Image: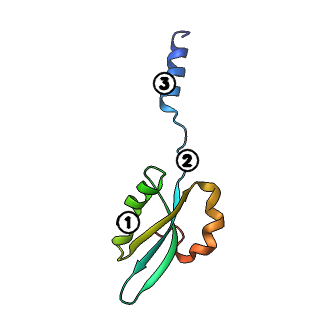
Amino acid sequence: MKHAFPLFVALGLLFASPAAAACFADYKAKKDDPLRLHYGVAQINGACDPAAARAELASRLAAEGWTLLNIVSVFGDEGLNQRKNSAGSNFLRF
């Protein structure tokens, strides 16, 4: 039994992974004919940097007919609530 304890500890450390920090991006997008613009906030599943956010979000928006104009910033949970009102219906929509 005393040989099993280190094994259980090692297995626990192996399978216990820290929770990945949430990543979000705020962005600007447009739709043509007629011209419509929107500001939104989206959760990013890949790397938490502007280039990765651009690649991931551009395809999500394009699927709904929107063109990504730019990534304003990427941030964690700490910046989410302060952007909620500005994003309105585009808060975590895409």
Question: In front here: 90 or 9?
Answer: 90
Structural distance between the alpha carbons of marks 2 and 3: 23 Å
Structural distance between the alpha carbons of marks 1 and 2: 22 Å
Disc number placed over residue 21 in the picture, else none: 2
List the residue tagged with mark 1.
58
The residue lying at 39 percent from left, 90 percent from top is: 34
What amino acid does circle 3 point to?
Answer: Leu
How crowded pointer 3 is (Cα within 10 Å; few <14, some 14-19, many 20+) is rated as few
- Rendered location of residue 94, percent (x, y): 45, 68
Query: Is residue 5 placed above or below 37 in the rendered structure?
Result: above
Locate the N terminus and report the quarter of the image it occupies. Answer: top right
- Rendered location of residue 17, percent (x, y): 51, 36
The quarter of the displayed image where residue 76 is located: bottom right
The residue at the far top in this view is 2
- Rendered location of residue 14, percent (x, y): 48, 27
The quarter of the displayed image where residue 51 is located: bottom left
How does the figure colour the protein chain or chains? Answer: rainbow
- Rendered location of residue 77, percent (x, y): 61, 55
Compared across the picture, whether 76 is left or right of 63 comes to: right
In the rendered structure, which disc, 2 or 3, sits on the residue that comes first in sequence? 3
Disc number placed over residue 11 in the picture, else none: 3
- Of badges 1 and 2, the one in the foreground is 1
What amino acid does circle 2 point to?
Answer: Ala
